[in-house]
């Protein structure tokens, strides 16, 4: 068994040595890097499918990837804060770069909690769902890929431009399709979709505030608002419990629909989210 583990470690290390390992925090970033770099790098996402990036802790297997990585492209979400300090201490050779430089943040829409004396402005961290925000993320990603693999600079540039063109076409088509929803309020449980809705002039209304469950009084107020808006759907993030959302949906005579902002196939998921929102609001 020990010999097998040693061989596995040796083989993994050898494979890792062939190409630079690029760490990303979430799965959508994996598409971003792969679209630009193709097979010139190995991309590893820290937050695995189905997990929440708010309190994620890497597995021992992932720590091996991290230790061998050339660079980590951090995106400014909750779990990174503690892990960045740990990685700097344990693996000082791993270069950690925030790829949020130049990103235009939005502020989370928030309702006032009963136990709070004043409103707090919180920047919305879900920047990978915004059209302009993603273009900035991709630009920063390209810069850093060129630095770790300068021999592939022209290759990266070509792929980057082709991917940007795909994104432009997709958002242009989606904007046309979603025009009937412009000005509408859409109710969500966790406020993860604000940047996406902003692209199409839609207002996000969330039941949860800064990770806090709404009180009974707040739920009643939001149910009243949802009824006034004639809302028939509450969208929930795949990584969160749907129980409370189901209770609220029952009160408004609606239903709960699950959408996942953390799908690896990012551009395909943008189309899917748009289509399912259109269908739900017919």
Image (cartoon, rainbow, N blue to C red):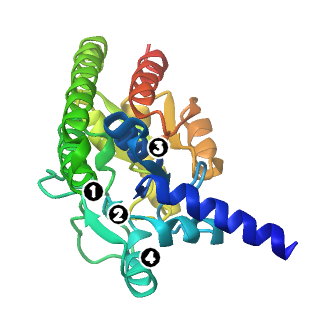
Q: Position of residue 194 (x, y in %)?
A: 30, 43
Which tag, 1 or 4, sits closer to the chain's start?
A: 4
Quadrant placement of the N terminus:
bottom right
> Which label lies toward us, 3 or 2?
2
Q: CA distance from mark 1 to mark 4?
A: 22 Å
Q: Nearer the viewer, residue 11 or 30?
A: 11
Q: Are marks 2 and 4 in contact (CB under 8 Å)?
A: no
Which tag, 1 or 3, sits closer to the chain's start?
A: 1
The answer to whether 279 appears left or right of 63 in the picture is: left
Q: CA distance from mark 1 to mark 2?
A: 8 Å
Q: Are marks 1 and 2 in contact (CB under 8 Å)?
A: yes
Name the residue tied to disc 1.
Answer: 148
Q: Secondary structure at mark 4?
A: helix
Q: Nearer the viewer, residue 36 or 195?
A: 36
> Which label lies toward us, 1 or 2?
1
Q: Position of residue 81 (x, y in %)?
A: 37, 75
Q: Which numbered marker is on residue 83?
A: 4
Q: Secondary structure at mark 3?
A: helix
Q: Are marks 1 and 3 in contact (CB under 8 Å)?
A: no
> Which label lies toward us, 1 or 4?
1
Name the residue tied to disc 3.
Answer: 223
Using the rendered view, name the quadrant where residue 2 is placed.
Answer: bottom right
Q: Nearer the viewer, residue 126 or 2?
A: 2
> Which label lies toward us, 2 or 4?
2
Which tag, 1 or 2, sits closer to the chain's start?
A: 2
Q: Residue at x 57, y 37 (%)?
A: 249
> Which label lies toward us, 3 or 4?
4
Q: Position of residue 120 (x, y in %)?
A: 23, 69
Would residue 217 be visible to someone looking at this image? yes
Relative to 199, say whether 141 is above or below.
below
Would residue 225 be visible to someone looking at this image? no
Q: CA distance from mark 1 to mark 3?
A: 51 Å
């Amino acid at each position: 068994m020990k010999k097998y583990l040693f061989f596995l470690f040796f083989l993994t290390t050898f494979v890792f040595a062939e190409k630079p390992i690029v760490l990303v925090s979430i799965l959508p970033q994996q598409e971003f890097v792969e679209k630009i770099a193709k097979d010139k790098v190995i991309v590893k996402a820290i937050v695995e499918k189905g997990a929440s990036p708010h309190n994620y802790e890497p597995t021992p297997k992932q720590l091996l990837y991290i230790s061998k990585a050339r660079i980590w492209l951090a995106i400014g979400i909750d779990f990174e804060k503690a892990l960045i300090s740990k990685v700097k201490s344990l693996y000082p050779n791993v270069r950690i770069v925030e790829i949020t430089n130049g990103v235009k943040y939005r502020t989370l829409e928030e309702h006032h909690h009963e136990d709070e004396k004043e409103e707090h402005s919180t920047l919305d961290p879900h920047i990978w769902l915004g059209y302009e925000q993603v273009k900035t993320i991709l630009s920063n990603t390209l810069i850093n890929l060129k630095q770790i693999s300068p021999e592939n600079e022209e290759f990266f540039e070509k792929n980057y431009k082709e991917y940007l063109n795909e994104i432009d076409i997709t958002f242009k088509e989606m904007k046309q399709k979603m025009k009937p929803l412009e000005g509408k309020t859409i109710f969500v449980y966790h406020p993860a979709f604000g940047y996406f809705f902003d692209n199409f002039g839609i207002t996000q209304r969330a039941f949860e505030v800064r990770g806090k469950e709404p009180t009974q009084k707040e739920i009643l107020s939001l149910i009243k608002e949802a009824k006034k808006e004639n809302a028939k759907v509450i969208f929930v993030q795949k990584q969160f419990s749907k129980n409370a959302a189901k209770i609220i949906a029952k009160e408004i005579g609606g239903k709960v629909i699950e959408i996942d902002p953390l799908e690896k196939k990012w551009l395909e998921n943008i189309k899917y989210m748009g289509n399912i929102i259109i269908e739900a609001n017919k």
